[in-house]
Amino acid sequence: MSISVLIADDQAMVRAGFAALLDAQDGIRVVGQAADGQEAVGLAARLDPDVILMDVRMPQLDGIAATRRILGPAYPAAHVPRILMLTTFDIDDYVYDALQAGASGFLLKDALPEELVQAVRVVAAGDALLSPRVTRRLISQFATQKPRASRGGAQLAELTDREREVLVLLAKGMSNTEIASELFIAEQTVKTHVGKMLGKIGARDRVQAVIFAYDAGLAEPAS
């Protein structure tokens, strides 16, 4: 089954370039293009895409507001899409809000073609896209822009010691492979721990787990 993609960006050349690249890939098809957030919300409900490439800054309705509407309880489509935010800088002032709104990650607009294709496949599979470098800077951004919420005690109490270790390493931006190497366990075991941990803390993906880890005091800004 192919991955259906909606592209939302106010620059026609960017939309056309992304569409041409993605349509040329096996198992990926672009089902629509939107020039602003308002149009993206409407097309998302009508086309029911698997993945939305969403520019953060757009006229009419910005990408964050559009993400909130699409991932909100009133969204009418059959299933909720995964949203991949497109940014000009590796940490945009608005990325934190986008991730809190439920976006599955973000990608630089100047990313390599193969990185864009891989990003679409990653989020379509239910994973979050957040590199270690960006994770470190994102945590720093949390500290400067948002006060620590000091929450999550009840959920933390539900975690086993191993699940807590996995959460801490995940919040550093480590992949499952890297966590497995760090803890000397099998990668499949890491996947099992991650799945159980996400369920216990109420996080939909790794991005939300990073936010939780910061709020709970398990992740600190880079020094």
Image (cartoon, rainbow, N blue to C red):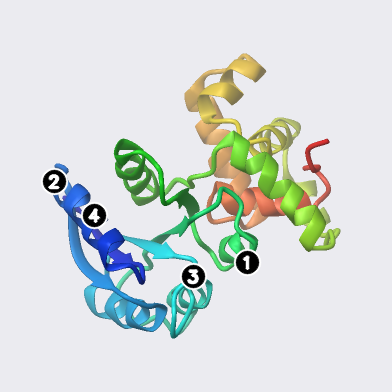
Tell me if mark 3 has few (under 14), some (14-19) or many (20+) residues whose alpha carbon lies within 10 angstroms of its own.
Answer: some
Q: Marks 2 and 4: in contact by CB < 8 Å?
A: no
- Tell me the SS state at disc 3: loop
Tell me if mark 4 has few (under 14), some (14-19) or many (20+) residues whose alpha carbon lies within 10 angstroms of its own.
Answer: few
Query: If you read the primary sequence from the N terminus, does the residue marked by circle 3 or circle 2 appear first?
Result: 2
Q: Which mark is residue 17?
A: 4
Q: Amino acid at mark 2?
A: Ala
- Tell me the SS state at disc 1: helix
Residue topped by disc 2: 24
- Of the residues tagged 3 and 2, which is closer to the observer? 3
Q: Which mark is residue 97?
A: 1
For the point 77% across and 48% down, which residue is it?
Answer: 156
Q: Amino acid at mark 3?
A: Arg
For the point 17% across and 53% down, which residue is it?
Answer: 20
Q: Is residue 212 left or right of residue 134?
A: right
**Residue 67 percent location from the top left of the image:** 47, 72
- Of the residues tagged 3 and 1, which is closer to the observer? 3
Foreground pick, 123 / 131: 131
- Tell me the SS state at disc 2: loop
